[in-house]
């Protein structure tokens, strides 16, 4: 693998230089701009979880996954240490992803209900999953500087795909996304609109772009095991995303 970005300035340049989504998805996994996250993602990949001790972890930044012409983007916060950081694909290989992709399958966005590895045959139609931070952070908690450093990748992704709707998973993802969007030239109201399940927010961005943000409780086990987020609730958000997408 060629040497990738090693500083925030490199990330800005690399994101801007990505002529298309394939180029962006190729450069993201080469990035080493955040020393703490590089160390953490690689340590997790060496120490592993007992259940995956025979597997080779991806242990690199995770690019977005899905339809290059998606009108709907699903955005979390960052890859999970033993999920996407293990498999190399967003929301793949953990219970959160199982819940999310099952809903996408029920609502017609995903070709199958499971997402287990990068070569499991899953394809997405009109939807793509991504994150403001591409490396698994300790305690699922990236620093503001790490989020800021990673932001140009999401900014470039948005300008290349120009989605109409973003389903934002969880309050932390909502805050991180709004901050990233503001830094990437989007008009984000102040005070920041609050996250809520079912919250909707219309934003204007660079080049006349317009985006509808849809808030959704995160697909974490903490929410799905307790019934705070049910399959019906997630299906309703994805169907609302399709409705908004068709109306604009
Ligand atoms: S979080 Fe983003 S900017 Fe930081 S090392 Fe990972 S991919 Fe690079």
Image: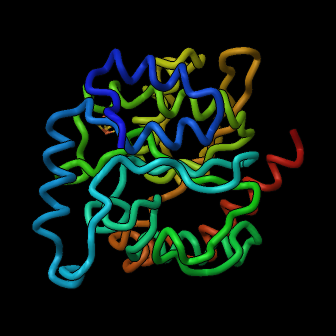
**Nearest to the observer: residue 169 or residue 20:** 20
Residue at horizontal 36 percent and vertical 73 percent from the top: 221
Q: Could you tell me residue 214's position as x and y percent?
A: 62, 46
* Residue 87 vertical placement versus 152 (above, below): below
Q: Residue sitting at 36 percent across and 49 percent down?
A: 78
**53 to 7, vertically: above or below:** below
Is residue 155 something one can see in this rendering? Answer: yes
Residue 91 drawn at (x, y percent): 45, 63
The quadrant of the picture occupied by the N terminus is top left
Judged from this view, the residue extending furthest toward the front is: 2
What's the residue at 55%, 77% (across, down)?
120
Give percent across and percent down for residue 22: 61, 42
Q: In front here: 166 or 119?
A: 119
State which image quarter holds ligand 1: top left
The C terminus sits in image quarter: top right
Task: In the rendered view, tell whether residue 216 sits above or below residue 26.
Answer: below
Residue 49 percent location from the top left of the image? 17, 75
Is residue 237 found left or right of 63 in the rendered image?
right
Horizontal side, residue 229 vs residue 32: left or right: right
31 vs 125: above or below: above
Colour scheme in the image? rainbow
Total numbered labels: 0
Classify residue 192 as left or right of residue 135: right
Q: Is residue 71 visible?
A: no
Asked if residue 111 lies left or right of residue 86, the reply is right
User: Could you say which is closer to the camera, residue 184 or residue 57?
Assistant: 57
* Residue farthest toward the right in the current orientation of the protein: 247
């Amino acid at each position: 693998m060629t040497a990738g970005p090693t500083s925030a300035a490199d990330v800005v340049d690399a994101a801007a230089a990505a002529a298309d989504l394939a180029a962006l998805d190729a450069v993201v996994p080469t990035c080493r701009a955040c020393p703490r996250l590089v160390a953490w993602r690689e340590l997790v990949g060496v120490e592993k979880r007992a259940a995956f001790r025979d597997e080779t972890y991806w242990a690199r930044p995770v690019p977005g996954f899905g339809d290059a012409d998606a009108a709907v983007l699903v955005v979390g916060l960052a890859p999970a240490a033993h999920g996407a950081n293990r498999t190399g694909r967003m929301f793949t290989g953990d219970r959160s992803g199982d819940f999310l992709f099952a809903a996408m399958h029920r609502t017609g966005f995903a070709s199958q209900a499971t997402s287990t590895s990068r070569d499991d045959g899953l394809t997405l139609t009109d939807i793509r999953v991504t994150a403001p931070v591409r490396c698994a952070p300790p305690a699922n908690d990236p620093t503001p500087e790490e989020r800021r450093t990673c932001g140009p990748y999401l900014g470039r992704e948005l300008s290349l795909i120009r989605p109409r709707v973003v389903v934002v998973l969880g309050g932390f993802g909502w805050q991180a996304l709004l901050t990233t969007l503001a830094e990437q030239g989007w008009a984000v109201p102040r005070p920041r609109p609050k996250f809520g399940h079912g919250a909707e927010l219309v934003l204007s961005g660079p080049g006349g772009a317009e985006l509808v943000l849809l808030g959704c409780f995160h697909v974490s086990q903490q929410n799905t095991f307790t019934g705070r987020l049910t399959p019906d609730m997630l299906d309703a958000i994805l169907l609302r995303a399709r409705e908004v997408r068709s109306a604009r």
